[in-house]
Image: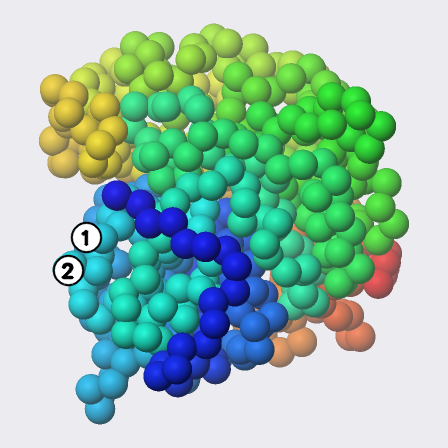
Amino acid sequence: MTHSIDTSPLPAPESAGDAPRRYFVTSFGCQMNVYDGERMGEMLAAQGMTQAQSRDEADLVILNTCHIREKAVARVYSDIGRLKREDGSKPMIAVAGCVAQAEGEEIARRARSVDIVVGPQAYHRLPQLIDQARRGETAIDTDMPVAAKFGALPGRARQQRPSAFLTVQEGCDKFCTYCVVPYTRGAEISRPYADLVGEARALVEAGVKEITLLGQNVNAWTGEDDQGRARGLEGLIEALADMTGLERIRYTTSHPNDMTDALIAAHRDIPKLMPYLHLPVQAGSDRILKAMNRSHTAASYLKLIERIRAARPDIAMSGDFIVGFPGETEADFQATLDIVRDTVYAQAFSFKYSPRPGTPAADMEDQIAPEIMDERLQRLQDLLNTQQHAFNLDTVGKRMKVLLERPGRKPGQLVGKSPWLQSVHVTQEGARIGDLIEVEIVSAGPNSLAGEPLALVAA
């Protein structure tokens, strides 16, 4: 059951509790949740609230949840319990995101300390929900209006880091049998071209030098440009690349079936598009891919990788893998190891299959024993880690530009990202976060690089 709330401002109640003045947002899971968390914070700031430094200092705590992994729901309830303070008081608690969408009123029933439950497509209504909570009502909104929230959100605030996320596409129509996204994020939609160009321009004016375009299937984005021409993601990237001050563009997460010739050509033709591509395959066995409803084969995936590398030979590939999908045999798992060896990844994410309630795979027969999944995951991660370390070692002696993003652990040290999304540690007197530094890589570990600064490329 969903609850619809009027988007017009609500009158202040005559006998309301104190309005929260300080908020704290904790986001779990994917980059899209990070973006949503940032936008919630910007919206609350526009309402006159300030960001607290910790949960303990906040009058309103928002748990922006993710439903992809096993035990996600249990972790939410555990986190809710930890918000009770020593004196018995608690902040106003809002559960947002995909767990909120999936659980709805069940959260309010099981955790009476929760004041607000809001899904990922309805968080633009937080001010009204807060007013309801102040009246002592439990405010629940899990409606899924198509892209309505983006028009209701405020302009982008000054960014704390030189890189930012920009959600361009939401939802999914692929219906992979293991995935809850179509049920928690809804149908696949693309935000309008003009809105995205405007938000990107605002981010650049606010100091951002690198934008990562986000979507459940980001390369499925389509829209009409300012001349009324139908464009795919490559057209949006072209428009952003023309912005003075924007130095780097990335995008994630992609689906193999939406990787068009035009988008592949963009990796060849647009220097600001970084040579890094996250393109999940999930498994190497055609039998398992069919059971997952992935709609591609191992051979078609490898052929696609060949075309991408022909267009951009230095591109770094990243991927996702699920180990222990129902019915997976040792031969199926060996096929996954084979596709990893054939592709050679610079980075990758791998997980044990975990059944998500309401998905077809959760009811499949031949669920794999946990100890078998553990052993297979270890073998897969050993191979992926070896490939990642080898990719990092191959950069030693190379010169590259690094965008400095945050302080390092050592005095005077800064950490930035290479074009291939590697963390690079550098020390240069006078360098600041947001500088684009040219460095020579002098050493490489499994997870990061060390660079010797050569020149300040741009500030």
Q: Residue at x 35, y 16 (%)?
A: 293
The image position of residue 374, as x and y in percent, is 21, 37
Q: Is 334 rendered above or below residue 53?
A: above
Numbered disc 2: secondary structure: helix
The image position of residue 161, as x and y in percent, is 66, 63
Tag 1: amino acid: Glu
Foreground residue, 338 or 4? 4
Foreground residue, 106 or 33? 106
The image position of residue 141, as x and y in percent, is 36, 53
Label 1: how many Cα within 10 Å (few below 14, some 14–19, many 20+): few
Relative side of 12 to 327, left or right: right
Quadrant location of the C terminus? bottom right
Q: How is the image coloured?
A: rainbow
Q: Residue 322 is drawn in which quadrant?
A: top left
Q: Residue at x 51, y 38 (%)?
A: 146
The image position of residue 142, as x and y in percent, is 35, 48
Label 2: how many Cα within 10 Å (few below 14, some 14–19, many 20+): few
Relative side of 374 to 302, left or right: left
Q: Which residue is mark 2?
A: 110
Numbered disc 1: secondary structure: helix
